Amino acid sequence: MPSSPAPRRSRPARPLACARHLIATVPPLMKAIRTEMRRAAPEGLTVPQFRVLIFARSFPGASITELAEHLGVTLPTASVTADRLIRQGLLQAPQIPGNRRRRALRLTDDGAAAIGSAMEATADAFATRLATLSREELALVEQALTLLESRMVEPLPASVSASRD
């Protein structure tokens, strides 16, 4: 009886290979972004405080609970960090009418300026790195990022979307 050939290991499907590449690429890219953002962060802000300001910029009206979930910390830790930023005049968190336990996080003008300048400095640093690409390569990167954003980035949670209205 002839022996049957050993089953071939099937190659990963193209989406799986792409997913593996994405998973391997994004963490070091995020590390580079965080490094540049920290370098450009306003003097005297801790990394957790800076992350709170970025979160408030990305999700205006989000709650302290949503902040704690985003940071992976306890509610009291998130609340203390937010309170420090409120005292520094970088964040505001008024109570939501009809819900005295929920506060809506929003940047102050000073907080928005601090984050804005750090993001611009980071964008400038990455623009320097991207300047080595051709126009065609830059267009390809932009198209890929737009496509990834449309398929991979989840919409805002309903509670954040509702608080923006």
Image (tube, helix red, strand yellow):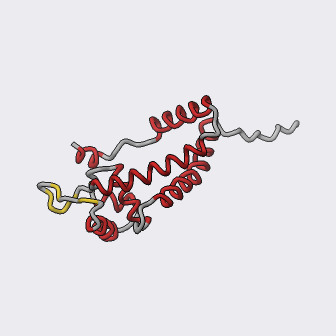
Residue 7, horizontal then vertical, whole percent: 76, 40
Q: If the image is split into quadrants, where does the N terminus sit?
A: top right
In front of the other: 61 or 98: 61
Q: Residue at x 40, y 66 (%)?
A: 45
In the figure, 76 relative to 123: above or below?
below
In front of the other: 132 or 58: 132
- In the displayed structure, does residue 84 sit left or right of residue 33? left
Q: If the image is split into quadrants, where does the C terminus sit?
A: top left
In the figure, 127 relative to 70: above or below?
above
* Residue located farthest toward the right when viewing the structure as drawn: 2
Q: Residue at x 41, y 52 (%)?
A: 117
- In the displayed structure, does residue 133 sit left or right of residue 36? right
Residue 126, horizontal then vertical, whole percent: 55, 47
Question: Splitting the image into 4 quarters, where does residue 17 fall?
Answer: top right
In front of the other: 18 or 47: 47
Residue 73, horizontal then vertical, whole percent: 38, 66
Residue 28, horizontal then vertical, whole percent: 59, 54
* Residue located farthest toward the left when viewing the structure as drawn: 98
